[in-house]
Image (cartoon, grey):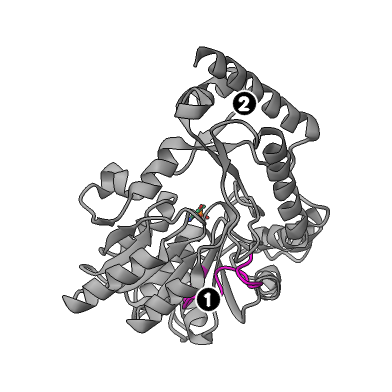
Amino acid sequence: MGDRELEFVKEAFDTNWIAPVGPHVDAFEQEFCQVVGTSHAAAVSSGTAALHLALQLIGVEPGDEVFCSTLTFIATASPITYLGAKPVFIDSDRTSWNMNPDLLEEALEHRAKIGKLPKAVVVVHLYGQSADIEPILKACDRYEIPLIEDAAESLGATYKGRSPGTFGRIGIFSFNGNKIITTSGGGMLIADDPNLVSKARFLATQARDPAPHYQHSEIGYNYRLSNVLAGIGRGQLLVLEERVQARRRNFEFYQQALGHLLGIEFMPEASFGRATRWLTCLTINPATFGIDREKVRLALAEQQIEARPVWKPLHLQTVFAECECIGGAVAEDLFERGLCLPSGSNLTTEDLERVVGSFNGIYGSAVQTY
Ligand SMILES: *Cc1c(COP(=O)(O)O)cnc(C)c1O
């Protein structure tokens, strides 16, 4: 937490706005619009809820297909199945680790020919780095497919100077505890179209029609963000840039200390923007490093250092075993060899030195074995 969050929370208590509505919710939405550069935003209870609303606003229905990045956390795709639709997964490129625009373009061209276009495309911006959004948007526009951007992991990043999430029809963000800023739990849905955002608020508050009694002509959800948590969010927005700097500092520290090791390759920063380095990720080539990713992870764990594999591609998940995947080898390789190092904004230099020291030790004994 920064310095102001508690003040905002106290204000919510003092004014008795302990509800999923109130002045902090309104202010958080407005301030968020300023920070990312969009015109309309609806604060909701999670990033997953925001995605669910986004897909529903676009009209995704049972039996539809939705194209979706495969290398991501499951929450990118779960809401597709909430609506009875089916995800079709798309592989990553090597420059950004995000959706490969060429694969998307080819797939849409093929689907247009056979008259089976998807209802929407969901693109993820992974680990603090924007996808190559312009060609992705161009391909979607050509076939008039709405684009939803899952920017849950990439608040604070840029693509050609603009925030990811602001390019597609709808963008979503998350303030879950693990994200770059947090409200403990929470999310945001943004769009340039005010009608989409007011419809999102409507659906997020049980779809209550304007009437003095409780009148409903649609089924909605209980998805609004608490005014108390919105107060935390307002304080967190003030330290976003600091957090980005801290995450980037972690990355640079690791890269300088470990970048020269044989078989290590850090996640590239694509030339089109600034990555936040929400997590510091790298790949390990076992042939040159001496041991594989999993052995490195376990050796770090032995020294009480938690590192994690890169997301397991969704097309390899049991729940999506039946789903089509276009390509997949790049995401599979990144999963096989990818490692996320400790990346918290509050890591001290001593923490980073300890990780680096352990990593070097593991490398040293791996090289000897090799
Ligand atoms: C965290 C995350 C979400 C979901 O956000 P919640 O607020 O946890 O529901 C969605 N997509 C990605 C890529 C995420 O990392």
Is residue 96 toward the left or the right of residue 91 in the image? right
Front-lying residue, 286 or 240: 286
Instruction: Name the residue at 27% across, 46% down.
Output: 319
Q: How many marks?
A: 2
Q: Main secondary structure of the magenta part?
A: loop
- Position of 59 with respect to 344 (left or right) is left
Name which residue type carries label 2: Ile
Region of the chain picked out in magenta, as a range: 158-171
Q: Residue furthest left?
A: 114
Residue 313 visible here: no
Instruction: Give the x, y percent position of residue 283.
Output: 51, 38
The label shown at residue 167 is: 1
Q: In the image shown, does 363 or 238 lie closer to the viewer?
A: 363
Q: In the rendered structure, which amino acid carries the disc numbered 1?
A: Phe
Image coordinates for residue 49, horizontal then vertical, percent: 46, 62
Q: How packed is label 2: few (under 14 Cα within 10 Å), some, or many (20 or more)?
A: some
Out of 317 and 259, give the one closest to the viewer.
259
Mark 1 near mark 2, Cβ–Cβ under 8 Å? no
Specify whether tag 1 is near ligand 1 (CB below 8 Å). no
Residue denoted by label 2 = 305
Above or below, 358 against 336 in this view is above
